[in-house]
Image: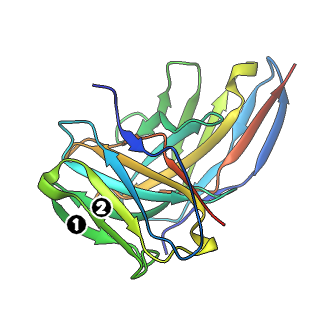
Amino acid sequence: DTGVSQDPRHKITKRGQNVTFRCDPISEHNRLYWYRQTLGQGPEFLTYFQNEAQLEKSRLLSDRFSAERPKGSFSTLEIQRTEQGDSAMYLCASSLTGDMGYTFGSGTRLTVV
Amino acid sequence: AQSVTQLDSQVPVFEEAPVELRCNYSSSVSVYLFWYVQYPNQGLQLLLKYLSGSTLVESINGFEAEFNKSQTSFHLRKPSVHISDTAEYFCAVCYSGGYNKLIFGAGTRLAVHP
């Protein structure tokens, strides 16, 4: 197992375009989290999946953001009509129920120009 | 509101000197506490965690942190730092009853100089 994988590592997009990121968690992990990290700040919680069910969403996740985890395996995070304020590192993490402390992926760095 | 405060945004220190990175969290009945480290251009790695039991927890690379419930603190310490410890350190708290959602501090950049 190679840990949590995120793709792409970097994404540059023009304002107004849609982008989609993918996260492949550790295979046996049933919990999956998305976080956003901006420069000089700690990661901020976006959303959480247990298996395929999205159980919690942050108020940071506006209507332009949507996340899915079909079949409880990989997850995608889509941002529609990107804005410059969306520029950030998007981090995915996974864990097992009852296991405290996640394993993070290396993140996807989004730059909106 | 639940929050984590890392009192120092940057800590410069000379190699082999001791260091303490401070972390305070907003009070709650039951918490779990974590320190993560982020090396340049890498993801977050779990350094150590406090779940229960002994209030002093240690990492494999010489860091330790002490849970102080009365002061709602979880400061990270190392008696002698190395150049390779240069990184961003994040304190995080998980409040019981949630979905293991972590709330992070803003981070402390540790810069170790020769």
Q: Quadrant of residue A95?
A: top left
At a point 50% along the width and 60% down the height, the residue shown is A36
Residue B11, given in percent of the width and then of the height, sits at: 80, 41
Residue A34, given in percent of the width and then of the height, sits at: 39, 57
Q: Residues within 10 Å of mark 1 (few under 14, many from 20)?
A: some
In front of the other: A96 or A10: A10
Seen in the image, is B9 located left or right of residue A113?
A: right
* Sequence-wise first label, 2 or 1: 2
Residue B75, given in percent of the width and then of the height, sits at: 61, 42
Can residue B68 be seen here? The reply is yes
At a point 59% along the width and 68% down the height, the residue shown is A14
Which type of secondary structure does the marked residue at label 1 adopt?
Answer: strand
In front of the other: B98 or A64: A64
Residue A31, given in percent of the width and then of the height, sits at: 24, 50
Which type of secondary structure does the marked residue at label 2 adopt?
Answer: strand
Q: Which residue is mark 1?
A: A54
Res. A48 mark: 2
Chain of the residue where label 1 is placed in the rendered structure:
A
Q: Are marks 2 and 1 on the same chain?
A: yes
Can residue B81 be seen here? The reply is no
At a point 76% along the width and 25% down the height, the residue shown is B18
At a point 74% along the width and 37% down the height, the residue shown is B110
Seen in the image, is B105 located left or right of residue B31?
A: right
